[in-house]
Amino acid sequence: MSLLLLILAYLALLFALGLWGEGRGRLRSPWVYTLSLGVYATAWTFYGSVGRATQDGVGFLPIYLGPTLGLLLWPFWLKLLRLAKRHRLTSWPDFLSARYGNDRLLGSLAALLLILGLLPYLALQLKAISQSFIYLQGSTGGPQPQPLEDVALYTALALALFTVLFGTRRLDPLERHPGLVLAVAFESLIKLLAFLVVAVFVLWKVFQLELSLPWETERLAPSLEAQFNWSMLILLSMLAFFFLPRQFYVMVVENEQEEHLRQAAWAFPLYLLLINLPVLPLSLAGLGLLPGLNPDLFVLALPLHLGSYELALLAFLGGFSAATAMVVVEALALSILISNTLLSPLVLRSPLQDPGQILLNLRRVTVVVLLILAYLYFRFSPEASLVQMGLVSFVAAAQLAPAGLLGLFWKEAGRLGVMLGMLAGYALWAYGLFLPGLWPEVFPGFASWFPGLDPVAQTAFLSLGANLALAVLGSYAFAKSKEEARQAQVFVLEQAPPAYQADWERVRPVLGRFLEAGVLEELARSPEGLEKAEALLAGVLGPASARLLMASVAQEAPRVEEVVEAVEAYRSLKELDQLKDEFIATVSHELRTPLTAIRSFAELLHMRPGMPEEERREFLRLLVEESQRLSRLVNRVLDLAELQAGPGLKREPLDLASLAQEALKLSAPLLAERGLGVETRLEPAILEGDHDRLLQLLLNLLSNAARHAKSRVWVRTYCEGGKSRLEVEDDGPGVPPEMREAIFESFRKLGKGGTGLGLAICRRIAQAHGGRLWVEGEEGARFILEVERGTDTHRGG
Amino acid sequence: MKLRSLFLFALGLLLFSYPLLYLPPGGLAQAVYLFAAWGLLIVLNRGLPSRGNEEEPR
Amino acid sequence: MARILIVEDEASIRLPLEYILRQEGHQVAWAESGEEGLRLAERLQPELVLLDLMLPGLDGFEVLQQLKARQKPPRVLILSARGREVERAKGLALGAEAYLVKPFGLEEMLAEVRRLLE
């Protein structure tokens, strides 16, 4: 009876801790995070490892060496944390469906297979609780209790209640549950302490009573088969550690700061090392003192045998905490998985009143159903060791790894490929492990293929190999949709997620009203075409209208034409006002920065008259510098405002070649100061325009080139196809393709220096002449001005 | 940072697999070796605390 | 005296702040981006953070939220080039203790700092 009381008291303590932690949502330290990762070590570790160690010595260790290796790669996993945060991903299937083109089918498939694959693992925990409870009650080897008398059933229900209370209280978009995490971290501490204390006690007794133990254990044979089994298990557990739903949950969803993972990367392996220290001593002691007993029970039996019921209770508590933490977190992770990938699309599509509440209730039901299913699996599956049951689930979870890892780091990975791979992997897993676990007589698995190999290692190798091979081949073989290609960029290159998704065929006619055909074609080919289109439209319509237009186009609303009409009527009135407001807001912000600096430096000099001469001079120098920056800015703003006002542009026949010579002469001191060589090829290129403005444009381009060039600047003028062109090229770092439009916007800077207005002014000048100005070039930047060619005979006013 | 972690990973892979089978006979020797290698990796992965700039004037 | 962290990407604004605060006897650290600021705040546990809102990378409001989400949140004095009421209200609602609009005077800033450190 005291055992039942202990269980109840422990559960009550957990509930209290959960409640307390829930109130203190911010009680997050890297240590709580590290300990919560300890949910990896389950009843399997607590009881099963000792059992396994009796058979093949260090053979229990790969399960913990794998995660250690995986965490050595922590800088790479930071990417997963960032992506999950940005895209609100709550599980690997979530990740997969988002990464592979927002494909529900892939996510649902992964979710279903995970649920099936993880049932044995949940069952394992219940089995461990039941087994240890029965053993402590003293009825060893007796028949299984009736379901209604089975403590495992009640535990399952209590844990379901716990999960429902702390995991499904509200629908949090981030799915964070601080109370639950705190409870899990606490359980990790309990199981570690219990394990260590029991081991110390047993060893102390052994030495005190001078009992003899077989101080030797099985060793790993130096055979190829053993090497294969060993390596496969390390690989398998490395993958499982990152792909089990509960691990994703504690590691990624509950992660608050990236720094925490950095710490956990060494602290968690340390936890694993500590919790594995007692395994071998306990297995040796068990073999020596209790031959013939089920070795999975050594942890409980040894303290009893050595005369301490209290320590046996402590051991029970350790195993119980290991099992309950796992069950709670896994059930929660799976229920989130089920509701997000399988249920929410259905609920959101149905005309129900309060979808949020319904989802929450469905999630609660899911938790209960899952735990009942796990209980049934445990009751009706044949006898198997704890480790064996867990490994079956490891192989299942690892099947997500090819799709997940390729999706994280390989842009070419495609949806059909990874789906095929996953299906093949799961088929092989089912044939090799899952079905043989349920009906060994009917399904022999792969055991007869290579008799020397461990069935788990063998199946893991075959299924993961097939999975990966199909994923890679399939990615090359099948064409990818536009959506997939875009998501690949968003995930692999971590570009900002595009705001729109739309069909170009529908958008094209609408955008055609505002943009040139050539520009449109270019946009249609680019993965962020719609974003760029909005940027361009914003130049035409102003940002708000552009947004409105794009949003209505992209949302597949049938009223596209109406919106266009409305916008066109509206824009002439509203646009100008809005543009002006925005410009003024930006300008005033840009002016405040040098102004703040100037004021501060001046006040500093004023307030501290006795400051050392050296410091005073430095501050004065900075003050002058900031004043110059401010006046530069003011001049530019005035220029731009003047240009925007429109009139006042002269039209006279000019030659770009002679303009270029003039500009080069004026810029010579600047270019010489930077030690830059200039190469020119100036052919006559006539046009009609404003001499001063065009000269200003050229000077701006030259000073820009001087700022970025390494050693050389090229200036060319020529005619091409009825247009006059001028090019200014440098051998600097160049402009990345995604910045090539942005640099012409006001206050967009590519780095420090410059006011951020120069190129905006240049472009205005070009546009005022009916021409274009753009940048290209692979190495270095090449700015090209193109203006309608003038004729010698024509003289405009 | 990434290079360092890849290097540690390769080192870990090596330590955990190859030499294991060629230790002197006895499972305990293997266990002692593994725990030692494990501890070494943890220490290496912890590394040095990151460098700050709190005392540099500008 | 107190540990103060300045998160501001413009060196010309940062420099005088840093100088005068050091003269007042404080320990001063600085960061040029939101991410760096959060990292330093984690390590140095400053009592006060002077925070610019327009930062490269992580937005100032985001930094503010994360600072305030910490176990022992520092006091935060916002230095913003945007004086609009909305921004001020948002900053204060997110838990900032005070809000200065650029260009501010050093005396004004020092007075706020003294008030916040009391």
Image: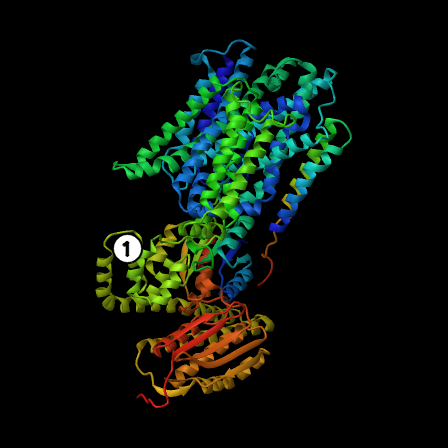
| Residue C20 in the image, given as x and y percentages of width and height | 52, 63
Q: Is residue A658 visible?
A: yes
Q: Amino acid at mark 1?
A: Ser
Query: Vertical placement of A352 versus A213: above or below?
Result: below
Query: Vertical placement of A525 versus A355: above or below?
Result: below
Viewer-closest of A683 and A244? A683
Tell me the chain of label 1.
A
Query: Vertical placement of B49 versus A178: above or below?
Result: below
Q: Is residue A282 visible?
A: no
Q: Residue at x 34, y 77 (%)?
A: A770
Q: Residue at x 46, y 32 (%)?
A: A114
Viewer-closest of A480 and B35? A480
Q: Residue at x 24, y 68 (%)?
A: A572
Viewer-closest of A790 and A576? A790
Query: Vertical placement of A342 versus A489: above or below?
Result: above
Instruction: Report the residue marked by disc 1.
Output: A552
Secondary-structure class at tag 1: helix
